Image (cartoon, rainbow, N blue to C red):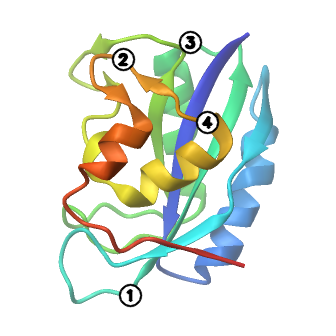
Amino acid sequence: MSRAWIGLGSNLEEPRHQIETAWSELDSLPETNVAACSSLYASKPMGPADQPDYLNAVALLETALEPLRLLDALQALEARHGRVRRRRWGPRTLDLDLLLYDERVVTTPRLKLPHPGIGERDFVLLPLLEIAGDIEIPGRGRASRLLAQCPSRTARRIE
């Protein structure tokens, strides 16, 4: 089994419900189980400011699915939640990002691992540190160092 870290985000249609539902649906993917889930974090939108704040979390999956097959499953799950890609960094019902897959570095037209934005997003690094300790991001360094250098710090843990 491989270990994959998934970033979850939502700012439409009851974001807490979207993320909590997605956790159980991730656990139902073939040859996959959820090993850990972070707390929820609220953050300002990264993109256009004319949208609601986000809720974010990170889940650790143990999976036998290869990265592209896992990406397909994540995108199908987003579609079932009504995800529509209208504008870059726009509002969404559910966003599922494959952040890390073991220590693999992948660069294809469809998938880049580690996720290209992982080092600039406190709403990813904070929940990742919560469940993965001070994980090493391949080619980038320790998550805690990346967080200390994060250009924007708006994420806060919520109950």
Instruction: Measuring from the top left, give residue 155's x and y in whole percent.
Output: 43, 71
Whole-number angstrom distance, CA of label 2 to CA of label 1? 32 Å
- On residue 138, the disc is 2
Q: Which of the two discs, 3 and 4, sits closer to the camera?
A: 4
Instruction: Measuring from the top left, give residue 99's x and y in whole percent.
Output: 44, 35
Label pair 2/1, CB-CB below 8 angstroms:
no
Q: Earlier in the sequence, mark 1 or mark 4?
A: 1
Q: Earlier in the sequence, mark 1 or mark 3?
A: 1
Residue type at the position of mark 1: Pro
Q: Which of the two discs, 4 and 2, sits closer to the camera?
A: 4
- On residue 66, the disc is 3
Residue type at the position of mark 2: Pro
Whole-number angstrom distance, CA of label 4 to CA of label 2? 15 Å
Q: Quadrant of the C terminus?
A: bottom right
- Which residue corresponds to mark 1? 52
Residue type at the position of mark 3: Glu
- Horizontal side of residue 139 vs 133, given as left or right: left
- Which residue corresponds to mark 4? 133
